[in-house]
Image (tube, rainbow, N blue to C red):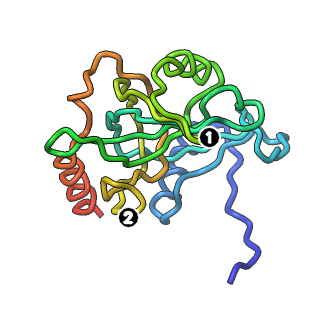
Amino acid sequence: VMTDFVAPQLVSGSAEEIERYYHEALDAGNEGIMLKVLDAPYLPGNRGKLWIKIKPEVDTIDLAVTGAEWGEGKRAKVFGSFVLACQDESGNLLEISRVATGIDDAMLSHLYELFKDRIIAEKGKSVTFEPDVIFEVGYAELQKSTNYEAGYALRFPRFVRLRDDKDISEIETMESLARRYSLQNKEE
């Protein structure tokens, strides 16, 4: 049952006070905090710098980009989200996540140029790529999941950067994911 609730608020110009508030929110079991310009209106679906989410990322991992979905609206001519995979002990790629967050319009344009000639299959809005590009992806938590071939999923995945300094053989493995999952759950 949902009831009306107004989240606690803090008006501050002090970085130390905001950081203290952020840690209190995390300690209370919240995902993070929202920072906003005081007189900024809420604009649904609008990305900008007037409202900012602040939440922790556990770590980053390197994953192969195996596909994408075409974007919608103003992003209809570029890829809007990307399919990511890790590898098993035989080097087979297993889907683990999709990522769209953290990619600004300029990077989306760059990624379109990077991937447009790597398309090996297309069905509806989905495309499959030759898997030779690696993304570094941040996440809040690694979870067990039956939704992905890897048996894991990234909670709140966020694009960090392209890893053109790495080879596909250097992406995350099932063994290292199992280790990460075990370590993460020991800390809780």
Figure quadrant of residue 81: top right
Q: Residue at x 44, y 30 (%)?
A: 129
CA neighbours of label 2 inside 10 A, class few (<14), some (14 to 19), many (20+):
few
Q: Residue at x 50, y 37 (%)?
A: 82
x, y percentage for residue 31? 52, 57
The residue type indicated by label 2 comes to: Thr
Mark 2 or 1, nearer chain start: 1
Determine which quarter of the picture holds residue 133: top left
Task: Please give the name of the residue rendered at 43% of the width and 47% of the height, measured from the top-left corner.
Answer: 97
**Residue 146: numbered disc:** 2
Q: Which mark is residue 135?
A: none
Q: What amino acid is at disc 1?
A: Lys
In the rendered structure, the answer to whether residue 107 lies left or right of residue 77 reads: left
Please name which of the two marks, 2 or 1, marks the residue nearer to the observer: 1
Graded by Cα atoms within 10 Å as few (under 14), some (14 to 19) or many (20 or more), the crowding at tag 1 reads: few
Q: Residue at point 46% right, 40% down?
A: 83
User: In the picture provided, is 89 more to the left or to the right than 34?
Assistant: left
Expressed as whole percent of the image width and height from the top left, the position of residue 115 reads 50, 21
Foreground of the two, 107 or 138: 107
Q: Which quarter shows the N terminus? A: bottom right
Q: Which residue is mark 1?
A: 125
Q: Secondary structure beneath disc 1?
A: loop
